[in-house]
Image (cartoon, rainbow, N blue to C red):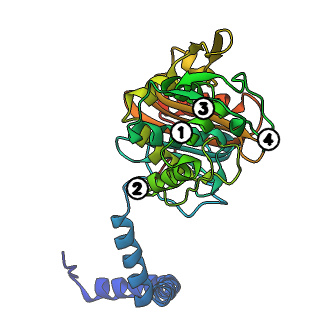
Amino acid sequence: MIATFDSPLRQAIMIKKLKRNLGRSLPLVAFIGVLSLGASLMYSPADATGQRSTAEASSRLPQYQSPYQVFERNLRPVSLTKVESTFTAPEVRAALRSEIAYVQDLQSSHVLYQKNSEQVRPIASITKLMTALVVVEAGQDMSEMLEITTADIDRLKNSTSRLHVGSKLSRADMLHLALMSSENRAANALGRHYPGGLNAFVRAMNDKARAIGMRQSRFVEPTGLSADNVSTPQDLVKLLQATSRHKLIHQYTTSEHYAVAPARGRQLQFNNTNRLVLNDKWNIQISKTGFINEAGECLVMLTEIEGRKVAIVLLNSHGRYSRIGDAVRLRDLVESKQLLTML
């Protein structure tokens, strides 16, 4: 609406009021102008471009904010995948007694947990899984009788055995004891009775390792008593998968007890070195334990958790039952979906 003035006097009065009000508002107008000028100086075109680039980059990221704190001193950087719930990685690490730990979902190939997983370490009697794989795939007569000789005595670690020199068992029984109760003399006898002898058997072990993709593994004898038998968690998962194709290895590694009657001597009762096979909460397909001073307490398993096949590798654990405790902790984390998935 446009103001109108009906007399010169009224017009003069209104003009005077307008001048007075304008004088009062000029400082405020000047102040607002200064603020506008400062804002235009601070917000440069370069900053606008930077903000746009950041927004574009953010739009390409997953639409969630990772809540994890990851402390990976011995691992390459890993990418994080969102899971339903979380844990603080250092707390879980502190709870594990194993120097090396590795959990992999075999159906998706996702690595669910890893700790020092790229280290090459002695594997002790985990070696016997490769021994079994070579024996079974060689197609030798499993009923053939093999004899324990002085060549099977452990002169490296001076470990004892209830299979005395002169004891005779079938190849099947020797394999059963080597896998279930980690019998060193039985494992060595299996290697000696391979075509070409022990040297040929060790070559076959290394050939088999290469054939199944165990690129960072090496074997020098069939028992695991030598610290020169080495591998990595990733390689051991491949070994677990290869052995799982043989029902005999599954049967022998998971049986709870077994009795044998050597040709000379009374009946002997042997037990599984992995007490978890006695636990109804576990569904274990392949299992093997190991120990020498250089390797610490070791345990590898192929098991089923929450309806999916999972490989667990624990190396160099400290304490007699620590590997068992670590396996239980990791299974509980898988079941509660609290594992940090690392791809």
> Which residue has dot 1 on it?
193
Q: How dense is the environment of label 2, judged by Cα within 10 Å: few (below 14), some, or many (20 and up)? A: few
x and y, in percent, of residue 12 in the image: 34, 89
Q: Looking at this rendering, what residue extends furthest in the top direction? A: 266
User: CA separation, marks 4 and 3?
Assistant: 27 Å
For the residue pair 114 and 49, the one nearer the viewer reads as 114
Residue 312 visible to the viewer? no
Helix, strand or loop under label 4:
loop
Q: Earlier in the sequence, mark 2 or mark 4?
A: 4
Does residue 162 appear to the left or right of 158 in the view shown? left
> Which residue has dot 3 on it?
327
x and y, in percent, of residue 140 in the image: 41, 35
Helix, strand or loop under label 3:
helix
Residue in the image at 52% along x and 47% along y: 236
Which numbered mark, 3 or 2, is in the foreground of this view?
Answer: 2
User: Hey, which quadrant is residue 6 in on the image?
Assistant: bottom left
Which numbered mark, 2 or 4, is in the foreground of this view?
Answer: 4
Does residue 106 appear to the left or right of 265 in the view shown? left
For the residue pair 120 and 37, the one nearer the viewer reads as 120
Which numbered mark, 3 or 1, is in the foreground of this view?
Answer: 1
Q: Find out whether the residues at labels 2 and 4 contact each other: C-beta distance under 8 Å.
A: no
Does residue 131 appear to the left or right of 62 in the view shown? right
> Which residue has dot 2 on it?
211
Residue in the image at 53% along x and 29% along y: 175
